[in-house]
Image (tube, rainbow, N blue to C red):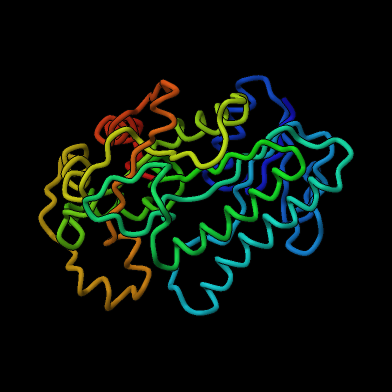
Amino acid sequence: MIIGITGGSGFIGQAVQRAAEEEGDQVILFSRRDREGRRRFSFTEPLDVSDCEGLVHLAGESIVGFWTLAKRKRILESRIEGTRRLVEGIAASSSRPKVLVSASAIGFYGNTGDHIADEDSPPGEGFLADVTRHWEAEALKAERCGVRVVLLRIGFVLGQQGGAMKMLEPVFRAGLGGKIGSGRQWMSCIEIHDLASMVMESLKNPSINGAVNAVMPAPVSNGEFTLAVARAVRRPAIIPAPAFALRLVLGDLSHLLLDSQRVIPKKFGELGFRYHFPSVSSAIQKIVGEGTLLA
């Protein structure tokens, strides 16, 4: 398969590229910068998707950083405009792809509390829930062109050499890690290689369409997650980060750490997807064993 990837230079994009090449697929990368061998990714012009049999759309402004009004605007508009230009490119192409796998996030469900959310659950409330709803709506417009669309709602990604969790490595190795807030909020995680496998399965399995949760089978509490990391690096985890302090320092960004996301992969479970790392503890042990804590 010839696979076009937007956001291919990012943490997830690189993993998907490696997985595709290992399966013998040809990869076409899209970039906002002019680079030899890459196609142009633009927020203002339709993308050239000619000859791409499948598309993986990962491009968008990082949600990490202070959520100022300007930052919020970039997060939302990058996803809407980037996806819109991609779909316009599909519509204009004489050789349309068969499938579009468009990244989304479990932020779609908002703060779930102790409630278990699956793909049939309604959207939640809040900034990230609004962003994902608009993002997914743009991607689904590709169905009008006869393209199968998969909305991959990605959980908290664990892996090496990148990602939001990288900041935790020195903290836990120094023995300064601890639960966040009450520690009772749920986390739904996915290991990076399993995530890349989910992308490939979504590309090649014609029975997969619509929203799909890319998470491990069992969510864990933040307290359980913290304990798993501490055990893996053989350090104590006794210094908590109080919720009020996080809200004071991080503002609305604190929702990423304090909101509960108890999400299960109903569709991948029904497909019998085989995880290499079905639990947080197994993923962290593997990562630590290779010399880097988290990514």
* Residue beneath the point at 27% across and 74% down: 247
Image position of 127 with respect to 169: above or below: below
Decide if residue 276 is on the left or right side of residue 70: left
Residue 19 position, x and y percent, is: 57, 28
Instruction: State the residue lying farthest toward the right.
Output: 94
Q: Where the N terminus falls, by quadrant?
A: top right
101, 166: nearer the viewer: 101
Quarter of image, res 32 = bottom right
Decide if residue 277 is on the left or right side of residue 70: left
Image position of 151 with respect to 241: above or below: above
* Residue beneath the point at 43% across and 73% down: 66
Residue 271 position, x and y percent, is: 45, 23
Residue 147 position, x and y percent, is: 71, 38
Q: Where the C terminus falls, by quadrant?
A: top left
Residue 196 position, x and y percent, is: 52, 33
139, 193: nearer the viewer: 139
* Residue beneath the point at 13% across and 60% down: 239
Decide if residue 11 is on the left or right side of residue 222: right
129, 176: nearer the viewer: 129
Number of marks in the rendered image:
0
